[in-house]
Amino acid sequence: MGWKEEFPNFDGGADCVRLVADGWEDVSWHNDTCPSFERGGVVIWVDCVNRMAREFPDAPHRFGVMYRHNDQTIDGCDALDGALLCADEAMQELAKEVE
C-alpha cells in the first residue's frame, strides 16, 4: 500500500509524487497522521496543505524530517519550511549528524 491508498483524501499529493520520483520509498501507513517516505535512513513526513486538516493546525511547517541509525530513531523531527525544496539536501545534512 502507498500514500494514495493509506491517505485517499490527502491534499499534498504533488509533493508525494516528487519524492517517489526522486527515489524515496513510500512507507506511509494509515495509522500515522500523514504520508511518509524513507531513503538512506532519513524519513520525510508530508503534512496536508490545508492547515485545518493537519494534526497540529498551528504548526508552521508542512514537512518533518527525522533520521534513523541502526533502526533506532535518534533525533526527533526537524521541520522544513515552505515548499519541499530538495529532499536530497535534507538527507545529506541530517546524515552528517549521524557520522
Image: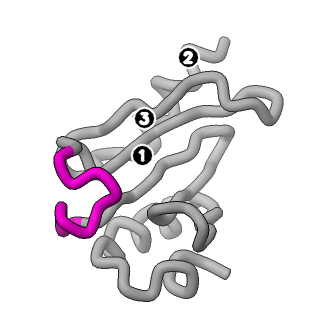
Q: Quadrant of residue 71?
A: top right
Circle 1: element type: helix
**Where is residue 24 shown, x and y percent of the image?**
57, 58
- Front-most of 18 and 16? 16
* 40 within the magenta span: no
The answer to whether the residues at label 1 and label 3 have Cβ atoms under 8 Å apart is: yes
**CA gap, disc 1 and disc 3:** 5 Å
In this rendering, the answer to whether 7 lies above or below 37 is: below
Question: Which of disc 2 and disc 1 is earlier in sequence?
Answer: 1
Residue 53 spot, x, y in % from top left: 26, 69
Label disc, if present, on residue 60 of the rendered structure: none
Q: Residue flagged by tag 2: what amino acid is it? A: Lys
Residue marked by disc 2:
96
Dot 3 alpha-carbon crowd within 10 angstroms: few under 14, some 14 to 19, many 20 or more: some
Mark 1 highlights which residue? 87
The overriding secondary structure of the stretch rendered in magenta is: loop
Residue indicated by mark 3: 90
Q: Earlier in the sequence, mark 2 or mark 3?
A: 3
Disc 3 is placed on an element classified as helix
Q: Nearer the viewer, residue 56 or 61?
A: 56
Q: Nearer the viewer, residue 92 or 58?
A: 58
From the viewer's perspective, is residue 92 above or below residue 59? above
Name which residue type carries label 3.
Ala
Secondary-structure class at tag 2? helix
Q: Nearer the viewer, residue 32 or 78?
A: 32
Magenta-drawn segment: 49-58
Q: Quadrant of residue 12?
A: bottom left
In the image, taking residue 31 as reference, residue 14 lies left or right, namely left
Q: CA distance from mark 2 to mark 3?
A: 10 Å
